[in-house]
Amino acid sequence: MRGRLTGYWLFAPAALWLALFFAIPLYSLLATSLFDPDGSVLTGYEVTFAWSNFPDAITEYWRPLVRSLVYAGIATGFCLVLGYVLAYAIAFKAGRWKNFMLVLVVAPFFTSFLVRTLSWKLILGDDGWIVDALQTVHLLGDDGRLLATPVAVVAGLTYNFLPFMVLPLYAALERLDPRLIEAASDLYASPARAFWKVTWPLSRPGVVGGVLLTFIPAAGDFINAELLGSPNERMVGNVIQNLFTTTGDYAAAGALSVTLMLIIVAMVVAYARTSSTEDLV
């Protein structure tokens, strides 16, 4: 009997953790999304199962919602290209510098997310060296700017979430047997063909994991849009934060949060199924 209960006792801490920090907050969020829209912070809210909160929130805030998905998708694409090159270099070309380069990849996590984003605000500022360089080569007008534009927001998202892409890619490439690439070369495959036929398919689990780890937090981010963008670049995270903390419209904030969560879950499931990777499907 005691042996049968051992597995349950081992599972209990994880179950308690999930209940406290996932199930209960999720239930609270779902309840908030069904609050009476006529309530307020002063008069209080009641769960009246107001399903109309969802279409109302989407109708009112569809632009920031779509903008968040677009910005997150673009940033994820940039992270995939940059991260794959970096992960490939670390896995196959770094040699004895491999561990040092991995430390450099995770080094930004040693500082605050807010501090890193504020640094980009200085780098992309109107008097920063990047703007000066682009104006010098006439890629940017004399009165042109990068800060408070979609370019700045996407750049911030790409920088902040790049390590989430690099690490899964490196883990997948590190497991790849170099003899498979050598075999492709022995069979007269060009380097490009060997990459697309051998390296890329075997690294797809890392690609899928990196895309998910990058896109999901990027879609809900609000710091980059707040510090690097303008009101025209507001993402859905900024709207939700404002509804919760400033406006006090908990019903709309909850409905918008649940809507974003459902959209991301649907996209993740569709992506994982179409990716056809045995590690994830």
Image (cartoon, rainbow, N blue to C red):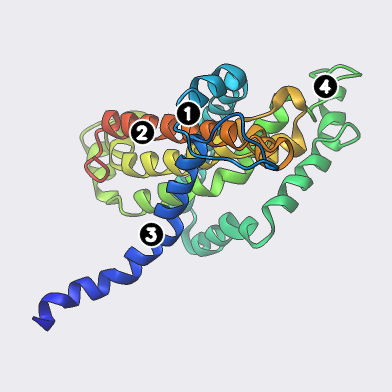
Nearer to us of marks 4 and 1 is 1
Check disc 1: other Cα within 10 Å, few if <14, some if 14-19, many if 20+: some
Nearer to us of marks 2 and 1 is 1
Residue 44 at x, y percent in the picture? 62, 42
Which amino acid, by three-letter code, is at mark 1?
Answer: Ala
Q: CA distance from mark 4 to mark 1?
A: 56 Å
The disc at residue 50 is: 1
Sequence order check: which comes first, mark 3 or mark 2?
Answer: 3
Q: CA distance from mark 2 to mark 1?
A: 59 Å
Looking at the image, residue 59 lies above or below residue 96? above
Sequence order check: which comes first, mark 3 or mark 4?
Answer: 3
- Which residue occupies 52% across, 36% down? 35
The disc at residue 137 is: 4
Residue 80 at x, y percent in the picture? 48, 36
The local secondary structure at tag 2 comes to: helix
Looking at the image, residue 12 lies above or below residue 68? below
- Which residue occupies 69% across, 28% down? 234
Sequence order check: which comes first, mark 2 or mark 1?
Answer: 1
Nearer to us of marks 4 and 2 is 4
Between 151 and 53, the residue placed more toward the observer is: 53
Sequence order check: which comes first, mark 3 or mark 1?
Answer: 3
In the picture of the structure, the residue carrying the numbered disc 2 is: 191
Q: Quadrant of the N terminus?
A: bottom left
Residue 112 at x, y percent in the picture? 69, 57
